[in-house]
Every structure is written in structure tokens, then in C-alpha cells.
Image (cartoon, rainbow, N blue to C red):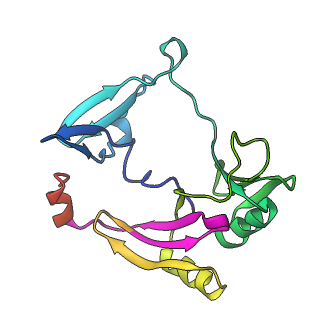
Amino acid sequence: MVRTALAERFEVMPPVSHVGGVRHRYLGVRRPAASRSTSGESRCVRPGRGATVAPLGPGGTPVHVSQIASAYAHPAPSDAGRWVAQWLGFDVLVDLGWYVSTAHPDEPSLRVDFVAHDHDTWSQESERVAGAMLALVVDDVDAQHERCAAGGVDVLMAPRSEPWGQRRTQLRGPAGLLVELVQAVPPDPVWLAEQGLA
């Protein structure tokens, strides 16, 4: 099952603070459902402190997002759509040749789209994806790694466990898109303590 990264552990994006002149990000701690805000406000929580951040929107109303999509430039969008269907389990919803839209059946509001790099949709022509990573949380990183490697997918990083509570592998996706498959694992208590999160 695909979920947004870290959604199971953390309620919101981490807030930023400055300590000793250095910019730091603190992971927000997920609060029990009963203690979450029902007023429509976004709440950013740092361990040991609480802060409420009102979302920006017209007239002060919350910004409603009904779908999240990312679009990547590709010389052959249909090929890219087939790749995410075959290796990541996405469904191809639309294939116009120059534009392909895909969605995952486990998270239909998550769309991964590909647009011809020379199409006038782009404000400037783009040759390939650069500096982008598509991260998907999966149930079993090792099984997905074995399946992809056996099928000839270019594996950039073998599965490894990280102290912050992720086991991850990285694959080379369409047109240079870095694809990371992540599985939630128990974090290292020593690492958590060192980060002030224990």
C-alpha cells in the first residue's frame, strides 16, 4: 500500500527554527486523533512545544487540496507511464502521447504525470528530470527491491535501514527521475535522543 511519506508517524510538515544561528527542522510528533484540531487550523507541533499555524487562503479560510500531482518532463511520456504502471503499480488514466496521467489504486488522489519535454505546457523546454525524487511508502521494501532488480530496473541504492525510522531503496526511474521506495521501521532510540525527539 502506498501512503504519503511519513504520514503514519507525523501529523504535519516539520516546523523550522533557528538554534545557535543554524536552521533546524524538527519532526512533528503525531498526536492522538482526539487531540487534533477540528477548527480547520493546521497545527505544527515540536516536541516539548506547541504552535498553531493558520493556513493561508482567501479570506483566511483553510486551503483545501483535493489532489496532489507531480508532473515530470520526459521525451516519451507513454513509455514513462508504462514504467510506473509496471514497476510501481500505478494505473494509466490518460495517455495523449504528449501527456500521461497515472494514479495509484491505493491512493487515487496521488497523481504522477509525464509531459513531453518540448510541449508548450512548460514555460521553458526541459530535457530531463533533474533534482527530483518520487518517494513512495510501501509495505515491504525488500520484496519490491528484489522484484525490480530481477526485472532489470536500475537499482541505485540497495535497501538499507536509517536511524530515523525508514528502510529505503532507490531506483532510476523514467528520464532520470529518482524513485525511492520507503518502509516505516522502528527508529533508533539513540538517534531520536540525539535529535531531541525522545
Q: Is residue 169 magenta?
A: yes
Horizontal relation, residue 186 to residue 168: left or right? left
Q: Is residue 109 magenta?
A: no
Segment colored magenta: 167-189
Residue 95: horizontal and vertical position, in percent?
A: 84, 55
Q: Quadrant of residue 120?
A: top right
Q: Quadrant of the C terminus?
A: bottom left
Q: Quadrant of residue 144?
A: bottom right
Q: Residue at x 67, y 66 (%)?
A: 174
Q: Residue at x 15, y 58 (%)?
A: 193
Horizontal relation, residue 73 to residue 146: left or right? right
Residue 135: horizontal and vertical position, in percent?
A: 52, 60
Residue 76: horizontal and vertical position, in percent?
A: 79, 62
Residue 41: horizontal and vertical position, in percent?
A: 41, 25
Extreme residue toward the bottom, this view: 150
Extreme residue toward the right, this view: 96
